[in-house]
Amino acid sequence: MFLRFTLLRESFLFALSALRDNRTRTLLSLLGVTIGIMTIIGVFSAVDTLRNNLEDSVRKIGSRTLYIEKWPWDGGPDFPWWKYVNRPEPKYTDFEAVRDRMTTASAVAYAINIPNSTAKFKNNSASNITVAAGTQEILQIRNLDIIEGRYFTDQESRSGGNGVILGATIAEGLFPRERAVGNYITLLGRKLQVIGVLKKEGSGMLIDVSNDDVAYIPFSMARNLVNYENYNPSISIEVQAPFSLEEAESELVGIMRSSRRLSPQREEDFSVNKTTLITAQLDQMFGIINLAGLSIGIFSILVGGFGIANIMFVSVKERTNLIGIQKALGAKQFFILSQFLIESILLCLIGGAIGLLCVFGLAALAKFALDFAVVVSLKMVFLTTALSTAIGLIAGIVPAINGARLDPVEAIRSK
């Protein structure tokens, strides 16, 4: 064992010396592997970043929340819209039935979204905002993070008080130099007092997820201002921890069918939506993206591997005389084989490390310049090491075997 370790150490030193003696060739060899590793790690990091951002957006909707709506979320190119277009919107009476009878829910809320609204304060205005009108429970369902002021009281929610809670972007636009809470703004043709401001969330990768451009008002107020059934109302149900989504969904379907007096033979005229519908589509989409990324990366790696193999054949040819001398002095095939394999693996590992550093550098640049976090996980380091070692072994094995099998007499005569 000690002898084998000594031979490996000597082989490593020989390989390192060969790389140092041929710096230009080494640099050009590294370039192909670096580009290949950088491509495959860059593609996987981009996919992971996209997936994380999308999943963050989905988590904002609620991973343990069910939604009763007219339209299902599992749309697509073959979406049968004609089956749903004549469905009734969820009514307030449906919400009351679910709220009063649901045993697996910790909170039930009713809400509408009024798009393309404009808020004004003195000479400042914020346009293209969404007014979310919901019942008292919407605070718990949507996990609203109020950093200034407060939420509606039960009395304000029931009576339709004239309070409003602003998203961060709206508050910044209307009140650039003063405190928002306590001031009155004009919204939906009414004078409303700002009672709270939400924490800034930033834009997500799904539509209508961030609360930055949303203003919250009580549903009791909104139903007196607009025909709420024209604004895609939905019933949100947060499922209690001991119960599964399937249990809650089964109970919810029974309550809704009873509320709408649907006979057993009739199909549901409502949709029960949940984030698992979105995540299932994301899994399918990212499966295709990962396959495409892997294909691109493999081709890039192959190019680098062919470059390394070519260089190793040249290295064996140049050192044929030295191999003959080493074998004449008693060097075994294992010693010659390990020299070239270690040299090939070292080339790939160095190239892989440089490629990984390039990806980390680009990620840091994106964070600094664009304030966009790119995910480069620890598994990428292990993937880089494994890929580089595999490429080195595959690219160097044939040249190394050729060098190890050389006849010492013929090898010495080759010079």
Image (cartoon, helix red, strand yellow):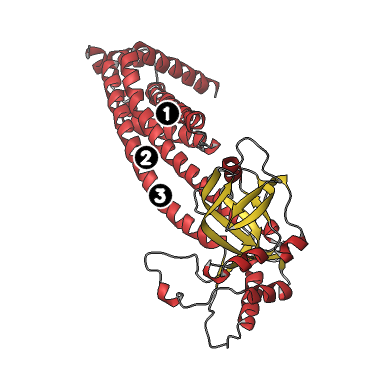
What's the residue type where badge 1 is placed? Gly
Indicate left or right for 351 with 380 as reference: left
Image x and y of residue 84, in percent: 46, 75
Indicate left or right for 320 with 195 as reference: left
Image x and y of residue 204, in percent: 52, 47
What's the residue type where badge 2 is placed? Gly
Indicate left or right for 327 with 129 as reference: left
Residue 143: in sight, yes or no?
no
Name the image quarter holding residue 178: top right
Cα distance, mark 2 to mark 1?
A: 12 Å
Q: Nearer the viewer, residue 281 or 219?
A: 219
274 lies above or below 258: above
The numbered dot on residue 297 is: 2
Name the image quarter holding residue 160: bottom right
The single residue placed furthest to the front in the displayed view is: 122
Q: Quadrant of the N terminus?
A: top right
**Residue at disc 3, secondary structure:** helix
- Front label number (2 vs 3): 3
Q: Mark 3 sits on what residue?
A: 289
Contact between labelled residues 1 and 3, with CB atoms less than 8 Å apart: no
Q: Of the residues under marks 2 and 3, which one precedes in the sequence?
A: 3
What's the residue type where badge 3 is placed? Ile
The single residue placed furthest to the left in the displayed view is: 414
Q: Quadrant of the C terminus?
A: top left
Q: Mark 1 sits on what residue?
A: 355
